[in-house]
Image (cartoon, rainbow, N blue to C red):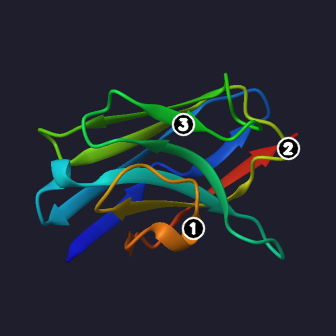
Amino acid sequence: QVQLVESGGGLVQAGGSLRLSCAASGRTFSNYAMGWFRQAPGKEREFVAAINWSGSSTYYADSVKGRFTISRDNAKNTVYLQMKSLKPADPAVYYCAARTYGSSRAVGEYDYWGQGTQVTVSS
């Protein structure tokens, strides 16, 4: 079992920045690829970014490429999502997730999920 706890969400003005954190506990963190997903009201959960076990490979949704950066610190059992130039389309509950094998963009391929953290963008 892996327990994931997100933090860092909040209210930010359009164009502003936030950094989300996801702290993992339980199994060996470096065994897992990690992903960030988001879900807005009335919409399906969607892929945002993913990172492999070592941090050497990262993947992004087209909608966030160039604005968001995923990273991880295996010594701290934490994965981050740095969000810049936030837009009115970005508000959602942001979730981190873990999977045993390689990185994936698919919601259904992740084994463990956090409870989510709310990101709100004011115009």
Q: Earlier in the sequence, mark 2 or mark 1?
A: 2
Q: Residue 5 at what x, y percent from top left?
A: 34, 64
| Residue nearest the viewer, comparing 19 with 43 | 43
| Mark 3 and mark 2: Cα distance apart in space | 22 Å
Badge 3: how crowded within 10 Å, few (<14), some, or many (20+)?
some
Q: What's under tag 1, amino acid-wise?
A: Val
**Left of 82 or right of it: where is 114?**
left
Q: Residue 107 at what x, y percent from top left?
A: 57, 67
Label placed on residue 107: 1
Name the residue at 68% across, 68% down: 45
Badge 2: how crowded within 10 Å, few (<14), some, or many (20+)?
few
Name the residue at 84% across, 47% down: 89
In this view, 116 is above or below 37: below
Helix, strand or loop under label 3: strand
| Mark 2 and mark 1: Cα distance apart in space | 23 Å
Q: What's under tag 2, amino acid-wise?
A: Pro
Helix, strand or loop under label 2: loop
In this view, 20 is above or below 54: below
Q: Earlier in the sequence, mark 3 or mark 2?
A: 3
Q: Which residue is mark 3?
A: 59
Q: Which residue is mark 2?
A: 88
Q: What's under tag 3, amino acid-wise?
A: Tyr
Name the residue at 34% across, 51% down: 33
**Left of 23 or right of it: where is 66?**
right
